[in-house]
């Protein structure tokens, strides 16, 4: 059980996060960015033989945030949102949150296990077309 002092500090922390996030959302200039010209890597590196590298990008599995907001805005959305708000209220005095740094959902854990099984059997090949 949290002491009232720790709970109050956690509440202030979440209030600060909410204020910073809201301020960034309202006043961010990110929408004004422009794509810069990318230099030719051959000119920079001074060689002409291309090298093939395979990179596998992995994004996190479904989070509790995704569970609420990425499943559509149909009739079940208000229920998902109210459930998340209730869970957030239950976490109010802690540093945990549904909306900030959201944890992985049960479906996200299943996705991570499936990816782990796939990568365990993944065969690297010398051909990028495989």
Image (cartoon, rainbow, N blue to C red):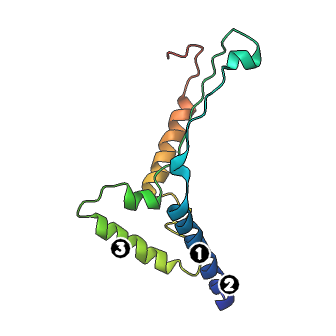
Circle 1 residues within 10 Å: few <14, some 14–19, many ≥20 = some
Q: Residue at x 66, y 19 (%)?
A: 40
Asked if disc 2 and disc 1 are in contact, CB closer than 8 Å, the reply is no
Circle 3 residues within 10 Å: few <14, some 14–19, many ≥20 = few
Numbered disc 1: secondary structure: helix
| Nearest to viewer (mark 2 / mark 1) | 1
Q: Nearer the viewer, residue 28 or 116?
A: 28
Figure check: 108 above or below 17: above
Query: Which quarter of the figure has residue 18?
Result: bottom right
Q: Is residue 101 left or right of residue 77?
A: right
| Residue at the extreme right of the image, as rendered | 46
Q: Residue at x 33, y 55 (%)?
A: 71
The residue to which callout 2 is attached is 6
Residue 72 image point, x, y percent: 30, 55
Which quadrant would the N terminus be assigned to in this image?
Answer: bottom right
For the residues labelled 1 and 3, the Cα–Cα distance comes to: 19 Å
| Residue at the extreme bottom of the image, as rendered | 4
Figure check: 108 above or below 99: above
For the residues labelled 2 and 1, the Cα–Cα distance comes to: 12 Å
| Residue 60 is at least partly visible in this image | no
Q: Is residue 118 left or right of residue 81?
A: right
The residue to which callout 3 is attached is 82
Q: Nearer the N terminus, badge 1 or badge 3?
A: 1
Numbered disc 2: secondary structure: helix
Q: Nearer the N terminus, badge 2 or badge 1?
A: 2
What's the mark number on residue 14? 1
For the residues labelled 2 and 3, the Cα–Cα distance comes to: 26 Å
């Amino acid at each position: 059980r949290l002491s009232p002092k720790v709970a109050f500090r956690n509440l202030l922390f979440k209030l600060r996060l909410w204020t910073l996030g809201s301020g960034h959302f309202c006043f961010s200039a990110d929408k004004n960015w422009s794509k810069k010209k990318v230099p030719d890597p051959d000119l920079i590196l001074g060689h002409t033989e291309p090298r093939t590298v395979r990179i596998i990008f992995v994004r996190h599995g479904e989070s509790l945030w995704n569970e609420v907001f990425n499943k559509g805005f149909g009739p079940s959305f208000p229920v998902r949102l109210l459930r998340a708000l209730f869970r957030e209220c239950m976490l109010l005095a802690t540093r945990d949150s549904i909306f900030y740094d959201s944890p992985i959902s049960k479906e996200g854990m299943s996705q991570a296990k499936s990816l782990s099984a796939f990568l365990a059997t993944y065969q690297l090949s010398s051909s990028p077309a495989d």
